[in-house]
Image (cartoon, rainbow, N blue to C red):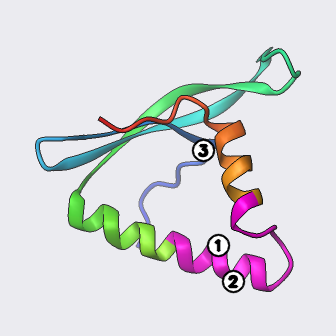
């Protein structure tokens, strides 16, 4: 049973440290926009998971993304990568 639901608009910084992946969760701030008029993302929490769980999640995300592309709901890999870079330009590893 799901005890808590969390809505996010994207990810902030993603870091690997001490054998765990730390993913900053972010929400759009509509009263603070960038130069293109898009809402900026603000940190709203942290998802911390072991590397193995992160890799499993990545495979799950990739599978869902592939189904979205096949169904015509989303564009192909190149467009998805461009969109992801535009939404979360601060994403980094390290």
Q: Secondary structure at mark 2?
A: helix
Which residue sits at x=64%, y=73%? 65
The image quadrant that residue 69 belongs to is: bottom right
Q: Residue furthest front?
A: 78
Give the Cα separation between the discs numbered 2 and 3: 21 Å
Label 3 CA crowd tier, 10 Å (few <14, some 14–19, many 20+): some
Is residue 57 depicted above or below 79 in this figure?
below
Find numbered disc 1 in the image and state the secondary structure of the residue it sits on. Answer: helix
Residue that carries the numbered disc 2 in the rendered image: 67
Which residue shows up at 44% across the image and 75% down it? Answer: 59
Left or right of 76? Residue 22 is left
Q: Position of residue 7 (x, y in %)?
A: 60, 48
- The image shows residue 17, relative to residue 32, as above or below, that is below
Contact between labelled residues 1 and 2, with CB atoms less than 8 Å apart: yes
| Principal secondary structure, stretch drawn in magenta | helix
Which quadrant does the N terminus fall into?
Answer: bottom left
Report the residue marked by disc 1. 65
């Amino acid at each position: 049973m799901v005890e808590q639901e969390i809505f996010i608009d994207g990810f902030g910084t993603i870091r690997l440290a001490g054998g765990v992946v730390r993913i900053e969760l972010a929400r759009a701030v509509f009263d603070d926009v960038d130069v293109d008029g898009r809402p900026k993302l603000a940190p709203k929490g942290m998802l911390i998971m072991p590397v193995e769980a992160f890799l499993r999640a990545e495979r799950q995300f990739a599978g869902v993304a592939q189904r979205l592309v096949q169904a015509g709901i989303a564009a192909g890999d190149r467009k998805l990568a461009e969109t992801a870079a535009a939404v979360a330009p601060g994403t980094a590893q390290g």
